Amino acid sequence: MLKYFQIPYVNNGRDFKGCDCYGLVKLMCKEINNKEIPNYIYEDAQSPDNGKIYKEELKKGKWVRCEAKKGAMVLLRIDGIANHCGYMIDDTKFIHITKKTGVAMANINDSMFRNRIIGFGEFND
């Protein structure tokens, strides 16, 4: 796990040279779960059509809602917008990255995150 904490924040980054939050989830899914997940870019999350791709893939059964568990993605709301995510490393802890903090570990029960959680999902290819 330590190698992930050395990754710098890079907008739309998808590898060890740099990641944004979704890039980190994508990288960890590939490395830990040996699972490729679709690529989204930051601008998709910021657009007025926010979540359309994710919602369409939910309808198709590609993303499946699940409980908080190891290997799942946690989707969070920041400033009222569903635009942040992290990778669950167990039932309560997740790893995420922001410009401000870099890679960090957090707990879904922490008051900073508890009310921002939209849900958990796993990609079903």
Image (cartoon, rainbow, N blue to C red):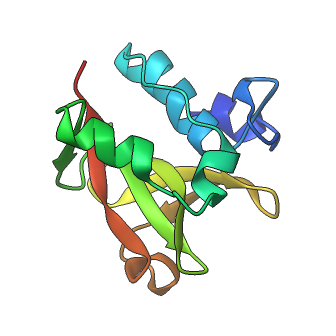
For the point 46% across and 65% down, the residue is 76
Left or right: residue 59 versus residue 8 is left
Residue 13 position in % (x across, y down): 75, 31
Q: Residue furthest front?
A: 49
For the point 39% across and 83% down, the residue is 115
Left or right: residue 108 versus residue 84 is left
**Residue toward you, 62 or 105:** 62
96 relative to 111, above or below: above
Q: Quadrant of the C terminus?
A: top left
- Is residue 107 at least partly visible in the picture? yes
**Residue toward you, 109 or 43:** 43
Left or right: residue 113 versus residue 40 is left
Residue 58 position in % (x across, y down): 24, 42
61 relative to 115, above or below: above
Residue 39 position in % (x across, y down): 54, 27
**Residue toward you, 115 or 106:** 115
For the point 79% across and 42% down, the residue is 11
For the point 65% across and 38% down, the residue is 41
Q: Residue furthest top?
A: 34
